[in-house]
Image (cartoon, grey):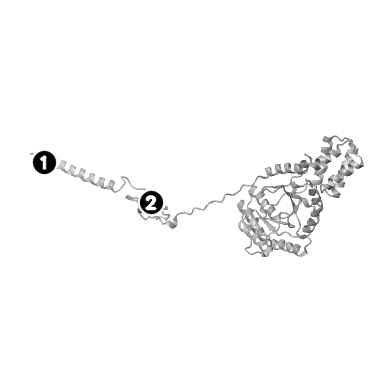
Amino acid sequence: MSAIDTFWEYLAVAVGIVVIVGGIALGLMRGRGGATKDLPPVDHRPTPGGRAVDVDEPLEGAIGTIESPEDLEVEEDLEPEVVPTPTLERPAEPAGRLRRLRARLARSNSALGKGLLALLAGGTLDEAAWEEVEDTLLAADLGVAATTQLVDALRVRVAAEGSTDEATVRGWLREELLALVDPSMDRTLVSERVDGRPACILVVGVNGTGKTTTVGKLARVLVAEDKDVVLGAADTFRAAAADQLATWGERVGVPTVRSDREGADPAAVAFDAVKAAAELEADVVLVDTAGRLQNKTGLMDELGKVKRVIEKQSPVDEVLLVLDATTGQNGMRQAQVFGEVVGITGIVLTKLDGTAKGGIVVAVQRELGVPVKLVGLGEGPDDLAPFDPEAFVDAILD
């Protein structure tokens, strides 16, 4: 055998050995789960057990196989806790409330509107007829002064124009009633942040007017307008008042500041509520107070103290007096005393849909010189609406 043949024979053997060794190595790599290309760099990221991983620490399981799930150790105390999210109610929009306002007022006050139109368009307006018009208006709690003003204005129109057809008389009546309700009064509710602080609304009233319920419903009105609200349960004398208010707040995701001690100082609770609202950067804080009779001097003095203590923390932007529309003229004295003690800025009339005494709106405004800003229309959670003078008068005459 020549030297060349011997060289090629050795070369073939060497190549064969290399191929065999390479195949064995490749098989071993595949058997151990190895990759045939470089692994990407390891980042900071959580392992299945929730532990942060350092870039210099090998990631267990990135190379090699996991024979069974038990090989992957997960600490049980790091498993996420599933907390159910409470379902919050979405209050009705203000526009929908106003539509219901007109419909319900039309039903409750239809007798007033129809009675006036029938009398004025009857064709014979003698003194007996005018006296009946006056009686109808007084029965609706319009008040003596407002009734006299309205009847005098209508007498002048009838004498000047002589027309008594229903359409014409209805137009006169609408104009004169609207003038009495006074659409020029500012009925805006201060519910935006003022000078970098939450607006502060104090709600007052006598016992039994539905004051705490009104505060809860007002919170819903503001939430529907995308306001951040905080409630203050400063009615510390009635055991269920704070619970009731907190329930109203929970339904729409609004926090309530309250005392854990029955009979706590209401002024201190009110102060804490306003302070908490500032810390939470809320838009508005609503402070509920205990109902009190206007002839109880001690209780009225205490209400004045609540307001003064709040003002050490923040100005009070609104003082809303809640009145029951069914009390009629009896509510006038209540309104006067509350106005003297805490300076009323607006009226909330509740139960307005359950009475034909819609004239109370005019009477209370004339008595106090402050506007009706909100009206309660019923028992539903969204049966509180901003007061609209034109919708109110149209509802009476529809």
* CA distance separating discs 1 and 2: 52 Å
Residue 113 place in picture, x, y as percent: 80, 41
Q: Say which of marks 1 and 2 sits in front.
A: 2
Q: Name the foreground residue: 237 vs 190.
A: 237
Give the percent coordinates (x, y) of residue 131.
Answer: 89, 44
Q: Residue at x 81, y 40 (%)?
A: 114
Which quarter of the figure is the C terminus placed in? top right
Image quadrant of residue 103? top right
SS class, disc 2: loop
Is residue 370 in view from this perspective? no
Side (left or right) of 387 relative to 64? right
* Residue occupied by mark 2: 42
Callout 2 crowding tier (Cα within 10 Å): few <14, some 14–19, many ≥20: some
Check disc 2 and give the amino acid type: Val
Residue pointed to by mark 1: 6
Question: Is the residue 73 above or below the residue 261 in the image?
Answer: above
Residue 271: x, y in percent? 66, 62
In the rendered image, the quadrant that contains the N terminus is top left
